Image (tube, rainbow, N blue to C red):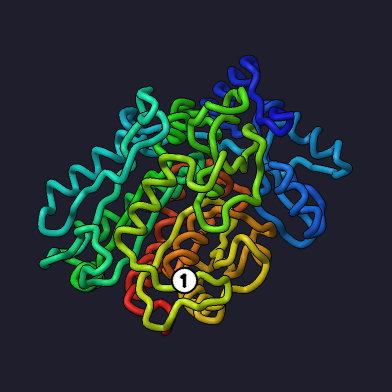
Amino acid sequence: MTARFSIRLTVAAAGLLVASAVGGTAHAAPDDPVSWRVPADPAQAVELARAGFDVTRSDSGAVYVVGDRAVAAQVRARGFAPAFFDTVYKGIETRAAGDTFYGGYRTVAAQETHLAKVAAAHPDLATEYPLGQSWRKVQGKGGHDIKAICLTKKQSGDCTLSPTSPKPKFVLMAQIHAREISTGELAWRWIDYLADGYATDATAKAILDTTEVWVVPIANPDGVDIVASGGNAPKLQRKNANTSRGNCSGTNIGVDLNRNSTFRWGADSNSPCAETYQGTGAGSEPETQALEKLFRAIYPVQRGTGDNDPAPDTARGTMITLHSFGNDIVIPWGFTSSRSPNDAAYRKLGAKFNAANGYLVGTNEETVGYSTSGTTDDFTYGALGVASFTFEVGAQSGTCGGFLPRYSCVDSTFWPKNKGAFITAAHAAAAPYRQ
Ligand SMILES: [Zn+2]
């Protein structure tokens, strides 16, 4: 039961996969994980997501499920008709080896070195913080600290992990789902744009003069280690590396950290090997605890406890959690199909993001097509009243689509599209609900 919805890679298939990726042909071996288009109505989309399938996106009358042929067979056994949609691997580009994989994507070690270098090079602008430890580190099995960098032109009280520090705050976080590899690269570019741009770019200067910008480039470092261990054929690890339940194997191990937050936790999968496994309890995972500790440190509670209590117009703070893929800007709520009490303001700010990146603005139901519980953005909005968004970066298919777009897509497409949205989010941090 627990392994029913697994994405399995046999040793033989893994060998084929490396060969095809190195060859750059981007044609999937028979047992590679790929996208399947599954005709389904909204209720059926919910059924598939609840059953633990990795339902990435719906369009008119269909959802997309990621998995190998065994997963497709499980979908078929439920009476659906999955059809091959897209390969996952896009081939690699030649680039010097080092702290990168799959043509240039940074490893966790490279991201950690980057944060330390930025902090050292810009002591007037940047402060690095460990937020907590990953599951493997807690277990004494390697692992990492979860790290954040705070960027601002430092004045008294700035970047001190205080809810009452003077400047409004914008938090950008990435790769809580490890395999959504373009997102950590966007965090990297955002950090460099602000830290390097302060001296030369009027917009970067204006942001850092007025705003605390927090960035968590790798929210799930153990998962990213697993992804990067595949090298030119990255492993499709979504969750953290927690192996304590379910005897799961391969990329089925772990808890889905974007189903583990403490606000309205508990309506997702209880199957440890499922892609959307929510964990044994609200906030059970050390990565979730580290993130929530950061958010609770820097943001006051600005909203009542009722689902229909709006964050007041005077509330401050913006948050974007980066995911892929689908070209969506997802607004609360995730846990219910009811609109949030700040829905109109969310759509106004979402429209400004859309003006930069062109992504579709809407609730879960209007975008990805299924409800979610225990997500990061439901927590930051629901518990703290921060204006919180999920971006699904990139198209569903093509060279710059899917989980593993070509590395060059980051600079050709994703960064140019999203830079303006991040700037907007920073500017909006002072009064996100008064747009
Ligand atoms: Zn995701």
Locate the C terminus and report the quarter of the image it occupies.
bottom left
Residue 253 percent location from the top left of the image:
56, 30
Which residue is most to the right? 79
Residue 165, quarter of picture: bottom left
The residue where tag 1 is placed is 353
From the viewer's side, name the closer residue of 84 and 382.
Answer: 382
Looking at the image, residue 230 sits to the left or right of residue 193; the answer is right
**Picture layout, residue 241 above or below residue 37:** above
User: Does residue 93 appear in this view?
Assistant: no
Q: Is residue 67 above or below residue 248?
A: below
Whole-percent x, y for residue 224 in the image: 44, 35
The image position of residue 266, as x and y in percent, is 61, 50
Q: Residue furthest top?
A: 12
Which residue is rendered at x = 38% and y = 63% of the image? 419
Can residue 374 be seen by looking at this rendering? yes
Crowd band around label 1 with a 10 angstrom C-alpha radius: few (<14), some (14–19), many (20+): many
**Horizontal side of residue 136 vs 20, given as left or right:** left
226 up-or-down from 320: above or below: above
| Ligand 1 neighbours mark 1 (CB distance < 8 Å) | no
Number of on-image labels: 1
Determine which quarter of the picture holds residue 340: bottom right
Q: Split into 4 quadrants, where in the image is the N terminus?
A: top right
Residue 261's spot in the image, x, y percent? 50, 51
Q: Residue at x 38, y 68 (%)?
A: 301
For the residue marked with disc 1, what is the amino acid?
Phe
Q: Residue at x 13, y 53 (%)?
A: 122
Question: Which one is in front, 119 or 193?
Answer: 119
Task: Name the element at disc 1.
Answer: helix
